[in-house]
Image (spheres, rainbow, N blue to C red):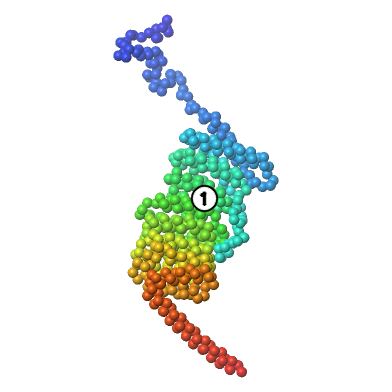
């Protein structure tokens, strides 16, 4: 009877919908406890992680052992580790494909495993010291890491984890020590590792907005160490990849440029032209410099001055690259800027025209085939009078005594072009050149006569 009395309540008028609301004791208790807990019951703990997460963490923990791929290691154990790494990669990619964030414990285990496998001391360089001319025919074309079968999968796991995690969650797991460790790996001589590392580091830069300034400073410090602290003959691995990242970053700089970005150009990028290994990263370096000139044409003067300051003396390959870079810069400046830069730039190119290296001489002569350069030189008032005398001397000298017939043919074509563009000025410069040569020959004859008199006098004194 007590149960029946508990459930009996006073009748209530029917609602407009005709449905009768529940009036049980459970309903009355729920009115007092909106969270749905009955009196005397405790709140249940949060649900435990999925069993798949525990299994994945155990699998990740089994991948901490590092194999050097030395002859004494068992191949079966190496293959078993690679299989486990591939399984981990598949599960990480599966979580990213389902737009599902990785569990916190899984991320912690993943980054520990990545650090254990990637962060290591680099072996001694396999490249011999570079000679001053920048050419080493005995250097190996490529140095490959023997542990790459494992490293490749580890890099793929890291990239997949970074891609599948948003920036806010990523900040809780990736600290500055981890970023510095990744940056140190750019010293690897294996180009495959540097390429994967470039992708991962760039992805981290795009997601960790709060660490971008630190990452830029770290890259600048690494590049400066290579310029000022590394031995001159030591190969600079990783510079090209770092400059590729910098080029993408520079492309996103807002205009007007900040003073920090201008300082990066003057203190980091321009000094990179001075190293013997500039040919290994010059394409990426020239792209970065040209991006600065595009965003602020007023920097062209400082850029050209910096390039001319680091001009090589015996490195012909580097000379060719710098001529190409100067030509690209001249294509984006206006005539007013060219008037200020014409004399130093054209004087250097004219000296390259008379170079003993056929490659340097030909590349310098081909500058006149550039329509933009020809337009700037002929349209700017007073420029041809300043730059043509140096070119005339180099052109005439090549036609008379250069050893390469190919260079002589290209020189003849340039001479015909110059005579067509400025015939009177070219004739006047040629006449001045002939007069200077006659004066020099006369002075040399007088000097030789004086030496002969001195020799005769000395010979008579000792008789």
Res. 177 in view: no
Res. 85 in view: yes
Q: Position of residue 290 (x, y in %)?
A: 42, 57
In this rendering, is residue 380 above or below 63? below
Q: Position of residue 457 (x, y in %)?
A: 56, 92
Residue that mark 1 sits on: 183
Q: Residue at x 54, y 89 (%)?
A: 452
Q: Position of residue 120 (x, y in %)?
A: 58, 48
Q: Residue at x 50, y 47 (%)?
A: 199
In this rendering, is residue 174 above or below 403? above
Image label count: 1
- Left or right: residue 19 compared with residue 146: left
Tell me the quadrant of the picture where the C terminus can be found.
Answer: bottom right
In this rendering, is residue 437 above or below 23? below
Q: Residues within 10 Å of mark 1 (few under 14, many from 20)?
A: some
Quadrant of the image occupied by residue 88: top right
Tell me the quadrant of the picture where the N terminus can be found.
Answer: top left
Between 369 and 302, the residue placed more toward the observer is 369
Between 246 and 133, the residue placed more toward the observer is 133
- Left or right: residue 268 compared with residue 17: right
Q: Residue at x 47, y 39 (%)?
A: 165
Label 1 residue SS: helix
Judged from this view, the residue extending furthest toward the top is 1
Q: Position of residue 275 (x, y in %)?
A: 52, 62
Q: Residue at x 50, y 45 (%)?
A: 200
Between 3 and 372, the residue placed more toward the observer is 372
């Amino acid at each position: 009877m007590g149960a029946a009395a508990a459930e009996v309540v006073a009748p209530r008028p029917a609602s407009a919908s005709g449905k009768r609301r529940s009036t049980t004791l459970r309903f009355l208790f729920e009115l007092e406890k909106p969270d749905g807990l009955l009196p005397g019951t405790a709140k249940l703990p949060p649900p435990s992680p999925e069993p798949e997460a525990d299994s994945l963490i155990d699998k990740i923990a089994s991948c901490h052992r590092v194999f050097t791929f030395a002859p004494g290691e068992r191949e079966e154990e190496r293959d078993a580790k690679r299989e486990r790494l591939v399984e981990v990669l598949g599960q990480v990619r599966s979580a990213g494909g389902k737009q599902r964030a990785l569990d916190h414990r899984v991320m912690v285990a993943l980054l520990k495993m990545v650090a254990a496998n990637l962060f290591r001391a680099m072996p001694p360089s396999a490249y011999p010291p570079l000679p001053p001319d920048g050419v080493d025919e005995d250097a190996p074309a490529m140095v490959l890491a023997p542990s790459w079968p494992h490293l490749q999968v580890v890099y793929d796991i890291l990239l997949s984890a970074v891609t599948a995690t948003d920036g806010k969650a990523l900040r809780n797991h990736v600290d500055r020590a981890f970023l510095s460790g990744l940056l140190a790996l750019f010293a690897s001589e294996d180009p495959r590792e540097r390429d994967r590392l470039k992708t991962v580091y760039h992805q981290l830069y795009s997601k960790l907005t709060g660490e971008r300034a630190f990452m830029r400073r770290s890259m600048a410090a690494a590049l400066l160490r290579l310029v000022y602290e590394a031995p001159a003959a030591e190969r600079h691995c990783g510079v090209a990849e770092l400059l590729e990242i910098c080029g993408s970053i520079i492309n996103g700089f807002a205009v007007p440029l900040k003073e920090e970005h201008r300082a990066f150009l003057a203190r980091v990028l321009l000094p990179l032209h001075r190293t013997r290994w500039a040919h290994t990263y010059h394409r990426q370096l020239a792209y970065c410099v040209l991006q600065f000139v595009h965003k602020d044409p007023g920097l062209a003067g400082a850029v050209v001055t910096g390039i001319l300051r680091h001009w090589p003396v015996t490195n012909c390959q580097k000379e060719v690259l710098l001529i190409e870079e100067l030509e690209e810069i001249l294509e984006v400046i206006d005539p007013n800027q060219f008037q200020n830069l014409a004399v130093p730039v054209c004087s250097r190119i004219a000296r390259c025209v008379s170079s003993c290296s056929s490659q340097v001489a030909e590349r310098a002569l081909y500058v006149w085939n550039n329509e933009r350069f020809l337009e700037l030189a002929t349209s700017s008032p007073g420029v041809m009078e300043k730059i043509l005398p140096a070119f005339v001397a180099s052109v005439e000298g090549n036609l008379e005594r250069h050893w390469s017939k190919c260079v002589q043919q290209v020189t003849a074509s340039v001479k015909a072009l110059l005579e067509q563009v400025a015939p009177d000025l070219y004739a006047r410069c040629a006449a001045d050149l002939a007069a200077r040569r006659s004066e020099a020959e006369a002075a040399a004859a007088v000097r030789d006569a004086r030496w002969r008199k001195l020799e005769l006098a000395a010979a008579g004194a000792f008789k």
